[in-house]
Amino acid sequence: MSSWIERTTPLSLLLLLAVFTAGEPLLAADGPGREATPEEISALDLDVRADGAGLPEGSGTVEQGEALYAEKCAACHGEFGEGVGRMPALIGGEDTLASDRPRRTVGSFWPFAPTVFDYVRRAMPFGHASTLSVDETYALAAFILNANGIVRDDFVADGRTLPAVKMPNRNGFLPDDRPGKPAVRCMSDCRSVPRIVSRARKEEGK
Amino acid sequence: MTPGMKSRITRRMLMRAAGLGALGAGAGALVRDAWAVVPETRKGLGPGVDTRPYGMPSPHEKEVVRRFIPWMNATTESSVSFTPLHALEGIITPNGLHFERHHAGAPVIAPDTHRLLIHGMVERPLVFTVEDLKRFPRHSRFHFLECAGNGALEWRGAQNNAVQFTHGMIACCQWTGVLLRDVLQYCGLKDGAKWLLCESADGAGYARSLPLKRALDDCLLVFAQNGEALRPEQGYPLRLLVPGCEGAASVKWLARIEVGDAPWMTREETARYSDLRPDGKARLFSLEMEANSVITNPCPENPLKRKGMQQLSGLAWSGRGRITAVDVSFDGGVNWRAARLEEPVLSKCLTRFRLPFEWNGEEMLLQSRAVDETGYVQPDYTTNRRNKGETGIYHNNSITTWHVAGTGEVTHVQLD
């Protein structure tokens, strides 16, 4: 597989053509884009991977998290993380995943603790994302894990402790194993006379 | 007298004879339908070319809009609106009717302030403006985009009585952009690179991991849909398009791609968009949308209005390639007839199927069943529930049944 770039302009040529300007980022020859500076990358590279890669310097305690939670989270997620209205619950749901009414919460479903830090940092509080400090984010992760009984009251969340937390549903995920050929193309006498077993209410969606 | 006029008079005479015509007091008098006058529009002027710099549909089409289900989500910003499939023809979704799915609303971004940063396991971390990206070779391709949750509300039984809500989390556009492959190779991929993290500039910092193999296949960095710039709801000024895969993989307002050696396992690909199986285990990265289809005429919104010739029509699609056949059943899946596939039939694109039939007022259980080029045959609910359970939320591509009553009324039902 050869891309148009390989066909038209060898990468080495592009690099040879690269222009240096004092104080300016390296320009990628006359090609599209320009080189990103380390400062630009570190300003935006805020993600945290499941294994904890990307967790920043800092820490937060369960106690600090509890106060923050009451102030910034409880209005939607409930006083105890039970969820308000259709806003997601953060606790509970143990042993429900194989039931008729599974409840997917941090405690019952999430496989990796660093993801709690990552998600709070990128998306929470809803409508006010990217406003929490690193320490506040660690504290909220500590509190949410503690509220689920996953870590003790004296837990301090940081770049070393979060990846070491064993989430209850850590082994609850599998690769995509949907069958590639679930059905056959039958054209006649394919089944018994059908019976209607459920009927949408007439007004639903009208 | 023209042949047309002659036939009208003949019809009126027939109607009168059958007692169906609203003839009023003057029975026997020649009655004109209200339309048969010189129209008022011939007596004046319409709006001039300066009235609508950006054209809108006729005011008489105001019911053809995206709709949402108020109780379905906690907020309208983290929610979904549905495409009115029952009111559309062909395979292209007009830009204003493309379903929406946001996790923190649709931000409005000025293109000159927007950047795409590509970094991580690349030889050269680069920053691109949208204008920069347009210097790569451009491609325009027709692809559907479907939310993984399309049909999610129907797993436990027929719930919504409208094709807009049972299947309206799908749309199909001609997308224009540049190949992600070209841009990644221009940055230079390092040995060991296997996954990307694709991140949005929205208020959810929405982020999904994408296997590099797929990124190097047919993914596009898109800046236009159906010939015009992306709509804000669709990721203006720049979005990812992962053809054939669940819409949530096609990150909108794309601002950053990090190249790595493992998936990130973000909340949106573990706690959400993973498919819970009946045994409580969840499938990860079930990206491909399996073959699916639905009849859009008739449907609950489009009942049969009269007996005689009917024009059955619907949509079929597969995330794994081209649709090769669509079968239609009138008796709830006992017997099937192949429908006509209308050109163009494109890979990972909506395909329109048609099958005229004669209806004499009998009850029917209408179904459609898609087959794709891999040989995959769309399963019925019994088969799909066996493999996926009914608590998995996502990837409901089960055969849908419309019950047609003797009155022509159409109701969404499920069968044993």
Image (cartoon, rainbow, N blue to C red):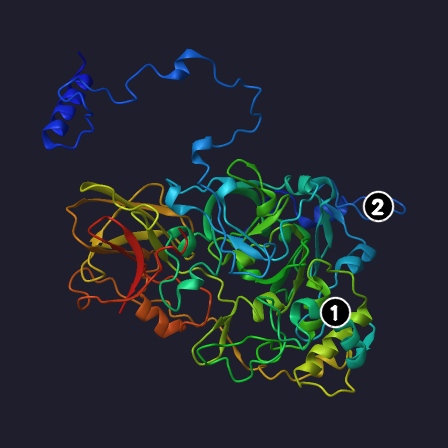
Q: Position of residue B301 (x, y in %)?
A: 35, 47
| Mark 2 neighbour class, 10 Å CA radius: few under 14, some 14 to 19, many 20 or more | few
Residue at the farthest right position: A22
Q: Earlier in the sequence, mark 2 or mark 1?
A: 2
Q: Secondary structure at mark 1?
A: loop
- At label 2, which amino acid type do we have? Phe
Residue sitting at 15 percent across and 64 percent down?
A: A189
The quadrant in which residue B344 appears is: top left
Q: Chain of mark 2?
A: A
**Residue that label 2 marks:** A20
From this viewpoint, is residue A11 visible? yes
**What chain does badge 1 belong to?**
A
Residue B122: percent from the left, percent from the top? Answer: 69, 58
- Residue type at numbered disc 1: Gly
Q: Residue furthest left?
A: B17
Left or right: where does residue B142 sit relative to residue B16?
right
Circle 1 residues within 10 Å: few <14, some 14–19, many ≥20: some
Q: Which residue is mark 1?
A: A54
The local secondary structure at tag 2 comes to: loop
Q: Would you place residue B353 above or below residue A189 in this image?
A: above
A192 relative position to B198: left or right: left
Image location (x, y in percent) of residue B255: 68, 52
Tell which of A52 and A28 is nearer to you.
A52
* The label number, if any, that marks residue B412 in the structure image: none
- Estimate the spatial distance between the alpha carbons at disc 2 and disc 1, rounded to whole Å: 30 Å
Q: Nearer the viewer, residue B149 or B153?
A: B153
Name the residue at 66% across, 59% down: B204
- Which quadrant of the view contains residue B340? top left
Residue B232: where, in percent of width, then height? 61, 44
Give yes or no for contact between labels 2 and 1 (Cβ–Cβ under 8 Å). no
